[in-house]
Image: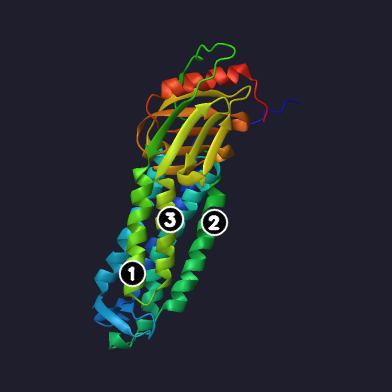
Amino acid sequence: MTTNLPAPRTSEDPDPRFWLGVFLPAAAVLAGCLALVAGWSPRLPAEVAQQWNWSTRAVTTVGPLWLNVLSLALPAAAVLCALAIMKWTGRLTGWGRRLSVVLLSGLAFFLAAALPAMLRGQMGLEDPWQAPDPRSATALVAVLSLAYGVLAAAVAGGRPLAADDDPGVPVSALDLAPEERAVWTTHLTAWVCLLGGGIPGLVLVALGLLTPLWGLSVAGVVLLVFAGVTGRWSVTVDHRGLTCTTLLGLGRFHVPANQGARAEVVAVRGLAEFLGWGIRVGSAGSVGLVFRNGEALRVHGRGGRSLTVTVRNAATAASLFNAQAARNTVSF
């Protein structure tokens, strides 16, 4: 008797789990919530409550139903589009992919389900200013959204969403004398981290000072500190390997130049390959410091680990790293 084992799945095979386990259920939640609200519309007041005071729980803003629907349904639809784009162009694997699925699918669920949660208490009311505060229902929706995102990520798995990255350009080792040592270093300004953390941080601090939600200021300060620390990087290649450190050395990524390690020059596309820019984490401990598109240094270490950093003159850095790795004289 002959048993034919199935061939292992690759990243280029169809991936129905993503569509059946992530995208379609999220789209169904959005469609179901819209249908539910449409069925409730004859029993809702002409204008519905939109915002409540955090302290008194009194209604502060009312508006037409269609405006409430669009304010939540359109962002939910945009998140679903982001999920589809991630399927077509995403290249992250492992925890990088799972984290993206958790965030996007959970956000789509929350935006869709928040609409009936906000309107349920307003059925049968004639005066929208008497609408109850939906805080408890919204909190429950938030918990369910997180659970849904985790479940969707588990269903989708960690298999790549697209083909593997194109191989980089091999770089020959620099010709160093036996006793010669060399150091290559550069400094990077990560504008994506400065702006990505600084602008939301300032907004949250302002909201915390101008509204009763003082806790937003704490979150804003955390974002501002993160932006300041990750906004400036030092990249060094020496006998120890590749080392990337943040301002004041508060964060550090390192790949040693030991036997088996190699460096190459690659051309990265932040959105297509890493689903964005900034500090990106993938499977097997792979890290990308992607602050722009274009030339980058990628170092492969043991266990499939890699460190990618967008620097200029990456060929020189890769050549020096390969020379240090070839010596294999450093013990770690």
* Rendered view: 304 above or below 140: above
* Rendered view: 3 above or below 233: above
The residue singled out by tag 3 in the image is 225
Query: Could you tell me the amino acid type at mark 2?
Result: Val
Q: Nearer the viewer, mark 1 or mark 2?
A: 1
**Mark 2: few, some, or many residues within 10 Å (few <14, many ≥20)?**
some
> Which residue is depicted at the point 36% across and 64% down?
204
In terms of secondary structure, where does tag 2 sit?
helix
- Tag 2 or tag 1, which sits nearer the N-term? 2
Q: Is residue 195 visible?
A: yes
* Rendered view: 190 above or below 315: below
Q: Nearer the viewer, mark 3 or mark 2?
A: 3
Q: Residue 48 location in percent, x, y?
A: 28, 79
* Rendered view: 11 above or below 30: above
Q: Where, quadrant-wise, is the N terminus in this rendering?
A: top right
Query: Could you tell me the amino acid type at mark 3?
Result: Val
Any mark on residue 207, and which? 1
**How far apart are labels 1 and 3 at the CA level?**
17 Å
Any mark on residue 150, and which? 2
Q: Nearer the viewer, residue 216 or 158?
A: 216
Query: Could you tell me the amino acid type at mark 1?
Result: Leu
> Which residue is depicted at the point 48% across and 63% down?
145
The answer to which image quadrant residue 67 occupies is bottom left
Q: Nearer the viewer, residue 69 or 332?
A: 332
